[in-house]
Amino acid sequence: MPGDAPGRTDVQTMTSWSVPVVWEGTFDPVLLDSLYQAKNLTIAATVFAVGKYIRFLKKFLETMEQHFFTGFNVHVFVFTDQPNEVPKVKMASGRQRTVKTVPTLNRWQDISASRMLLVLTLIEEELRDYADFIFCLDVDSEFHGRWGTESLGDLVGVLHPGYYKSDRSGFPYERRPISKAYMAPEEGDFYYCGGAFGGNLQEVERFCQTCSINFWDDRIKGIEAAWQEESHLNRYMWINKPSKVLSPEYLWQDFLARNPEIHLIRFSGIVKNYAEIRPNV
Ligand code: 5GW
Ligand code: MN
């Protein structure tokens, strides 16, 4: 029926603070695209491919072309220590790619620490007056289905596929009070993933600012949160509620069984051979 919002009854489609949780079947993609088309938006995306992770970039970029905001202006920023190895994946008109060279870092802790700062710098120096929204994505993943305008919001978190059925006592939050990512037992709405998040430029700028400050505060004290950036993201999104929550369709994991409520996997982490890809540290 026209004007009738499509719905789902088998999953939570609204948070306790009344913002949508986006699942397949809860939105009309054609209607949304036509509404957003008129705004002539630019969507930025960042992806890091440092060291051996460069091998994931080709599939990531190819599938992104097929599924990520097709028909919209998209600007992808690839951060890598091997700019010459970035695959030349053909992009449709309105879409572009910029390669940013970063130093070779071997420890995940250092990559993680520099990621938020590099995104912050990108926003402040290049994107603030140019892009409307930004998403930050893990490279060890591939797109399999639409990721489009339904995902747009001021601050956007993605439910972690491993924890969307747990309650807060099962979330792997940072539990040491000395950390800036600390979550008390009575705190927490969801467990969000660190591998995909986004929002408008101002909100993501504020988010990156706060998380890098907290990350470095911890580091000075010799503390590293349980899941590094992801822990800080979870603290941030508890205090600053996202204005839209994306279901685990937006970052599934290939090794997980596909549950019946997952009607469509849009983006999914591939199964990695850790011994092969992670630097020896
Ligand atoms: C990751 C773990 C240990 C040591 C190094 C890395 C690593 C991460 C790397 O060597 N190069 C790199 O580009 N990354 C970036 O960080 C990738 O964009 C990657 O997708 C992201 C997060 O790391 P992941 O994907 O290994 O983390 P999980 O939690 O998805 O397994
Ligand atoms: Mn990953």
Image (spheres, rainbow, N blue to C red):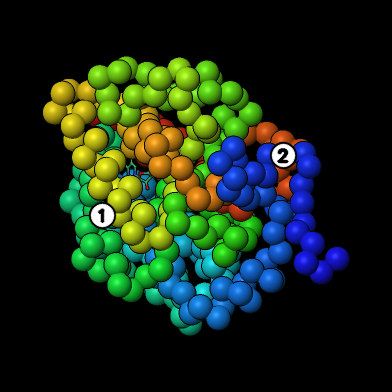
Q: Is residue 6 left or right of residue 33?
A: right
The residue at 60%/25% (across/down) is 166
Q: Position of residue 224 (x, y in %)?
A: 26, 26
Q: Name the residue type under label 2.
A: Val
Q: Is residue 280 left or right of residue 24?
A: left
Quadrant location of residue 172?
top left
Determine which of the numbered discs, if any, sits on residue 153 in the image: none
- Which residue is nearer to you in this view: 270 or 226? 226
Residue under pointer 1: 120
Residue 182 vertical placement versus 35 (above, below) = above
Q: Position of residue 250 (x, y in %)?
A: 57, 49
Quarter occupied by the C terminus: top left
- Which residue is nearer to you in this view: 19 or 72? 19
Q: Secondary structure at mark 1?
A: helix
Q: Is residue 216 left or right of residue 26?
A: left
**Label 2 environment density (alpha carbons within 10 Å; few <14, some 14–19, many ≥20):** few
Q: CA distance from mark 2 to mark 1?
A: 34 Å
Residue under pointer 2: 11
Q: Name the residue type under label 1.
A: Leu
Query: How many numbered discs?
Result: 2
Q: Position of residue 212 (x, y in %)?
A: 24, 42
The residue at 30%/68% (across/down) is 127
Residue 174 vertical placement versus 161 (above, below) = above
Q: Secondary structure at mark 2?
A: loop
Residue 111 in view in this figure: no
